[in-house]
């Protein structure tokens, strides 16, 4: 047998970027490359269609070594499955969570929770289970400490976290108290970057804001005379994990690199940033909530691949109210399947070496560091976050950023999911809210006398579909899908051979709005006449599925990339919803 090494690529010519570009230009046929193939994040980072070694200088760091881009572990270790609970879910749900495989409990408790209520909530929970108070639950800190003492938990064996705001004036004193009392396994403060993300912040803004809060915490501890390395060890960073898996992976990698730069500047011995990932609240929907299972699965995978130390997955029904046992179980099992069956944690930094991920990590690090320097100089993130939220909202409105089950492929007949109401974060802004408000308004009107159209008992529009099915099906399907996103039923009475037939059928339908649908070729011959016939028959609002063209005389146009939210609001206004 020959000892020669066989090269699988040896019989092929090496192809470079120039050769690839020649082939791309043949496909584009003159269309602008940047417009067709280059994307841009809300931080202005350009996403190229192809990455090579030239796009990344190379990261020579190893897993477990500063700057911890590749993670804080030398060998693969499982992340902590940390699930959220409150008084609304109750003690039974907490115990079921732990029996089902969760490692830790994050408690969301308000200042009205008594010591006795906390005791009831954690009844039967072993002292070996970390109890993490969520940000905003600081009022229960001493309840938790008292609970540990009353249960005989040794202070050096207590596991959990206080969830304090790192900018709280009392945070340094709390750190000192945990040291004096020998609570060596208790985290004191949480830098809540996820809060910024739920307000609409971009990835770099979330990183920069969290970095600024972390530095403020270190300054407070330094002024109190505390050892900075010890203080840094009592800090956890909380980041949102979203549906863009690549951006999420790169964000967690960039966060560790950024924090390593801060600790280096503070002369702290290198230590990896402690990261807690929570699935994004902004991406969750109340409509077709089962799709949330897919969103949170992608987010959980990305957080795990990005190296998060702990992950919290939101139940699919959490945007509606207090989750039910199914929602809690699916959320927990999402993590367990990825960890125990898919073994995502067995490979350290699985995306490391990917030119795309490495380049994206570099870009996020650079952009976030620049924003952080501006914050240190006295700037504010408020305007930037608002601008990012508005940009993202525009993409949601035009469906450039589609929300499956809400703005795309809505199901008007989906079963109602009711849950006990819970108080939501007033600063959190879900992307689906504008579309859901339209659905709510349409549902509220459904069944009223003026909308009872035979079997249709909801606000409706009439589809004036011209020509054979092959000519109109693409646009009639598009129109039906779009109006359904606003809770509107599309009445499909088949195909019409001429404008008069369409006008006659519309008149019998009883709805005040018509949407003309067909191909460009059919529009050249029949669009203007059909619009005119519908108006002569008494239709007060005629839309046309296609690009705006004043020749057709329609009152409005719906097309791919249009402001679907504005179009739906106009339909609602016409229907008096």
Image (tube, helix red, strand yellow):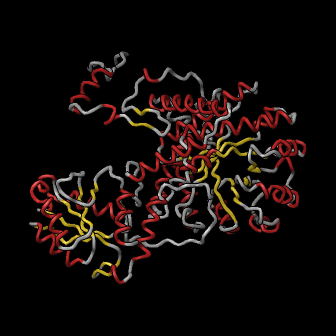
Q: Quadrant of residue 492?
A: bottom left
Give how far across and how far down residue 90 sits, in percent: 69, 68
Horizontal side of 121 relative to 347 (left or right) equals: right
Kindly indicate the quadrant of the structure image that contains residue 173.
top right
Q: Residue 309 at x, y = what percent?
A: 64, 43
**Residue farthest to the bottom, as pictured:** 449
Q: Residue at x 58, y 55 (%)?
A: 428
Quadrant of the image containing the C terminus: bottom left
Visible residue check, residue 74:
no
Q: Is 481 on the left-hand or right-hand side of 82?
A: left
The residue nearer to you, when weighing 67 against 437, is 437
258 relative position to 390: left or right:
right
Nearer the observer, 13 or 443: 443
Question: Residue 106's quadrant in the figure?
Answer: bottom right
Image coords of residue 46 (percent x, y): 43, 32
Q: Quadrant of the N terminus?
A: top left
**As drawn, 437 above or below 428:** below
Which x, y percent locates residue 38?
37, 34
Residue at point 42% right, 67% down?
Answer: 439
Q: Is residue 244 visible in the rendered structure shown here?
A: yes
Report the residue at 34% width, 16% height from top: 2
Q: Is residue 57 left or right of residue 550?
A: right
How many numbered discs sit on the rendered protein? 0
């Amino acid at each position: 047998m020959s000892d020669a090494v066989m090269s699988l690529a040896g019989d092929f010519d090496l192809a470079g970027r120039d050769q690839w570009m020649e082939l791309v230009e043949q496909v584009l046929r003159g269309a602008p490359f940047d417009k067709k193939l280059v994307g841009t994040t809300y931080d202005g980072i350009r996403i190229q269609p192809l990455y090579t070694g030239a796009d990344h200088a190379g990261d020579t760091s190893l897993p477990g070594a500063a700057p911890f881009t590749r993670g804080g572990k030398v060998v693969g270790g499982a992340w902590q499955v940390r699930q959220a609970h409150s008084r609304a879910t109750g003690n039974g749900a907490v115990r079921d969570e732990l029996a089902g495989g969760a490692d830790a409990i994050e408690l969301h408790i308000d200042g009205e929770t008594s010591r006795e209520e906390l005791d009831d909530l954690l009844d039967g929970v072993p002292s070996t289970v970390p109890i993490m108070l969520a940000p905003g639950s600081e009022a229960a800190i001493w309840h938790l400490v008292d609970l540990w003492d009353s249960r005989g938990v040794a202070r050096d064996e207590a596991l959990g976290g206080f969830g304090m705001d790192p900018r709280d004036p009392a945070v340094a004193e709390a750190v000192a108290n945990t040291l004096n009392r020998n609570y060596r396994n208790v985290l004191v403060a949480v830098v809540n970057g996820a809060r910024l993300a739920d307000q609409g912040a971009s990835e770099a803004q979330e990183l920069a804001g969290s970095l600024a809060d972390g530095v403020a915490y270190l300054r407070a501890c330094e002024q109190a005379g505390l050892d900075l390395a010890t203080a840094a060890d009592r800090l956890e960073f909380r980041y949102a994990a979203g549906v863009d898996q690549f951006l999420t992976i790169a964000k967690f990698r960039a966060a560790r690199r950024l924090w390593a730069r801060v600790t280096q500047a503070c002369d702290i011995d290198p230590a990896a940033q402690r990261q807690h990932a929570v699935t994004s609240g902004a991406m969750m929907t109340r409509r077709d909530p089962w799709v949330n299972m897919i969103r949170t699965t992608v987010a959980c995978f990305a957080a795990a691949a990005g190296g998060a130390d702990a992950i919290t997955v939101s139940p699919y029904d959490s945007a509606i109210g207090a989750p039910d046992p199914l929602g809690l179980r699916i959320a927990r099992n999402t993590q367990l399947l990825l960890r125990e069956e898919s073994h995502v944690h067995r490979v350290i930094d699985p995306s490391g070496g990917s030119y795309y991920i490495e380049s994206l990590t570099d870009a996020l690090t650079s952009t976030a560091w620049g924003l952080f320097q501006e914050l240190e100089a006295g700037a504010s993130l408020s305007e930037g976050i608002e601008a990012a939220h508005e940009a993202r909202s525009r993409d949601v409105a035009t469906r450039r950023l589609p929300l499956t089950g809400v703005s795309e492929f809505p199901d008007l007949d989906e079963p109602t999911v009711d849950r006990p109401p819970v108080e939501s974060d007033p600063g959190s802004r879900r992307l689906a809210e504008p579309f859901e408000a339209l659905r709510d308004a349409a549902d509220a009107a459904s069944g009223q006398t003026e909308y009872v159209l035979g079997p249709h008992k909801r606000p409706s529009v009439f589809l004036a579909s011209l020509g054979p099915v092959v000519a109109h099906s693409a646009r009639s399907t598009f129109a039906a899908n779009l109006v359904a996103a606003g809770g509107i039923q599309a009445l499909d009475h088949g195909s019409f051979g001429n404008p008069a037939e369409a006008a006659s059928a519309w008149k019998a339908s009883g709805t005040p709005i018509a949407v003309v649908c067909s191909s460009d070729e059919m529009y050249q011959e029949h669009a203007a006449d059909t619009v005119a016939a519908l108006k002569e028959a008494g239709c007060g609002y005629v839309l046309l599925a296609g690009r705006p063209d004043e020749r057709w005389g329609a009152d409005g146009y719906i097309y791919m990339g249009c402001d679907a939210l504005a179009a739906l609001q106009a339909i609602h206004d016409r229907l008096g919803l």
